[in-house]
């Protein structure tokens, strides 16, 4: 029996990339995670390529190691993007059905969506995703799927995400160079929200916050529909920088202190004690109180969440979110949800994980750092209603590098 296709979700993060590979389990008909990796990448800053050599090397390493572990090639690769160059907004499209037969077809729905896409965008930008949010027929609103119904005027509301063509193409080149094909680009927040938020949360009014290292992604759902989304060009790496500077230690040691001892709310500080801090040159250590780490972290976390609050206030939906879901690596810090409740004014905030009924996986891959990559794989396996309007795929054969084929994987294509 042939092995099922290996589906990979590649999350292009802040200074790192994370990948989840999965396949359909023929016995249970469930998607099963087979492997996962998260690797640092010096060629990425804020989700955008700053060094194509470094980025291609990281792609070769992470995808190649996953293929070797699974003993098969990746057949579908979906990439999740983030960054300040992304912009999202809503628009409205209409289509008049002039046929004698007024029955609405999928082609009519597609044309309505195409008309909604016909709007001016920045010269260097291109559309990444278009998500239909709801239809109306002859002014009757609240229709989820009009196919097969009758009417003369079909209208659709859509949520559009655009991004810089330069950044998108540079990322595509970095992935193509080792011989891989991108089957779809997505604004990472969208599949993540579909896999982390419950339908009840989307209906009642929910804010989703993906806390990354150099970016924070914010989305607002109302009545089950994504109404607003935006990336903020700040993230939890600022906490690491603060610790490094004020504790006079390297960024790596500051990151380790943040992850091991860091809390952002006083009630999470356990008994007072001291922790060792290596010097910048690593030759000596000095001790500091745990409370001093809190004193450094808390103001920065408050500032970050205040940035989110400002984003929500200017979104036009300030009073609509009732609950909040925080995910991403930054959500692991104790006290983050408490700050979201107090600063954002939400009734309830929880830490978000991929819903377990959607996928079979080892416990390790339910860690929030894998949530976006896992969400992309889940989307690729089953789709969630916006696959027909996703960004175009990038074929490895469309570039001179791609034409060299799979044998390039694992080879230093730059030489030296």
Image: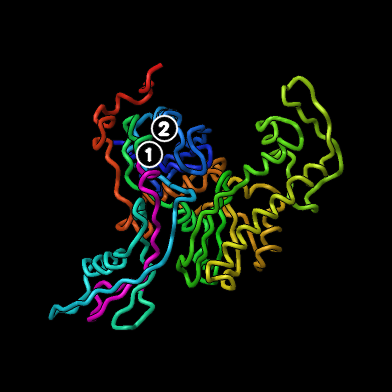
400 relative to 364, above or below: above
Q: Please, which colouring scheme is shown?
A: rainbow
| First in residue order: circle 2 vs circle 1 | 2
Q: Give residue 5's quadrant in the image.
A: top left
Q: Residue shown at 65%/44% (left/top)?
A: 238
Image coordinates of residue 409 in percent, x first then y, are 35, 26
- Front position in the image: 176 or 170: 170
- Front position in the image: 212 or 164: 164
Q: Are marks 2 and 1 in contact (CB under 8 Å)?
A: yes
Residue 141 colored in magenta in the image: no
Q: Secondary structure at mark 1?
A: helix
Image coordinates of residue 78 in percent, x first then y, are 38, 45
Q: Give the magenta part as a residue range.
A: 144-169
- Front position in the image: 138 or 415: 415
- Front position in the image: 224 or 185: 185
Q: Is residue 294 visible?
A: yes
Where does the C terminus fall, quadrant-wise? top left
Residue 210, numbered circle: none
- Residue lying at the far right in this picture: please name it: 272
Q: Residue shown at 46%/58% (left/top)?
A: 194
Residue 52, numbered circle: 2
Q: Residue shown at 67%/39% (left/top)?
A: 241
Find disc 1 in the rendering and name its residue: 170
Q: Is residue 100 left or right of residue 146?
A: left
């Amino acid at each position: 029996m042939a092995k099922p296709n290996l589906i990979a979700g590649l999350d292009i993060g802040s200074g790192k990339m994370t990948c989840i590979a999965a396949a359909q389990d023929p016995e249970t008909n469930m998607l099963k995670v087979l492997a996962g990796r998260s690797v640092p990448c010096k060629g990425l800053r804020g989700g955008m390529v700053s060094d194509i050599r470094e980025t291609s090397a990281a792609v070769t390493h992470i995808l190649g190691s996953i293929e070797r572990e699974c003993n098969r090639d990746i057949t579908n690769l979906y990439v999740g993007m983030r960054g300040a160059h992304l912009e999202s907004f809503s628009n409205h499209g209409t289509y008049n059905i002039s046929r004698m037969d007024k029955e609405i077809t999928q082609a009519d729905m597609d044309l309505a969506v195409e008309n909604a896409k016909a709007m001016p965008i920045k010269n260097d930008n291109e559309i990444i995703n278009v998500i239909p949010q709801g239809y109306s027929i002859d002014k009757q609103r609240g229709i989820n799927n009009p196919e097969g119904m009758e009417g003369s005027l079909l209208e659709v509301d859509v949520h559009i995400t655009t991004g810089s063509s330069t950044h998108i193409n540079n990322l595509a080149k970095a992935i193509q160079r080792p011989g891989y094909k991108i089957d779809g680009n997505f604004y990472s927040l969208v599949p993540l929200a579909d896999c982390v938020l419950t339908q009840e949360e989307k209906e009642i009014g929910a804010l989703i916050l993906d806390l990354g290292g150099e970016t924070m992604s914010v989305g607002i759902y109302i009545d089950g529909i994504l109404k607003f989304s935006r990336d903020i060009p700040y993230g939890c790496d600022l906490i690491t920088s603060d610790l490094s500077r004020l504790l006079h230690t390297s960024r790596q040691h500051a990151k380790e202190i943040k992850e091991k001892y860091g809390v952002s709310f006083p009630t999470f500080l356990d008994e007072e004690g001291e922790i060792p801090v290596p010097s910048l040159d690593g030759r000596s250590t000095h001790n500091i109180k745990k409370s001093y780490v809190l004193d450094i972290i808390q103001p920065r976390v408050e500032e970050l969440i205040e940035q989110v609050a400002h984003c929500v206030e200017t979104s036009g939906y300030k009073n609509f979110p009732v609950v909040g879901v925080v995910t991403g690596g930054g959500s692991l810090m104790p006290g983050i949800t408490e700050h979201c409740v107090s600063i954002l004014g939400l009734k309830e905030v929880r830490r978000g994980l991929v819903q377990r009924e959607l996928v079979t996986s080892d416990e390790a891959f339910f860690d929030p750092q894998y949530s976006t990559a896992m969400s992309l794989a889940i989307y690729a396996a089953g789709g969630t209603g916006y696959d027909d309007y996703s960004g175009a795929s990038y074929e490895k054969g469309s570039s001179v590098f791609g034409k060299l084929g799979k044998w390039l994987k694992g080879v230093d294509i730059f030489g030296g």
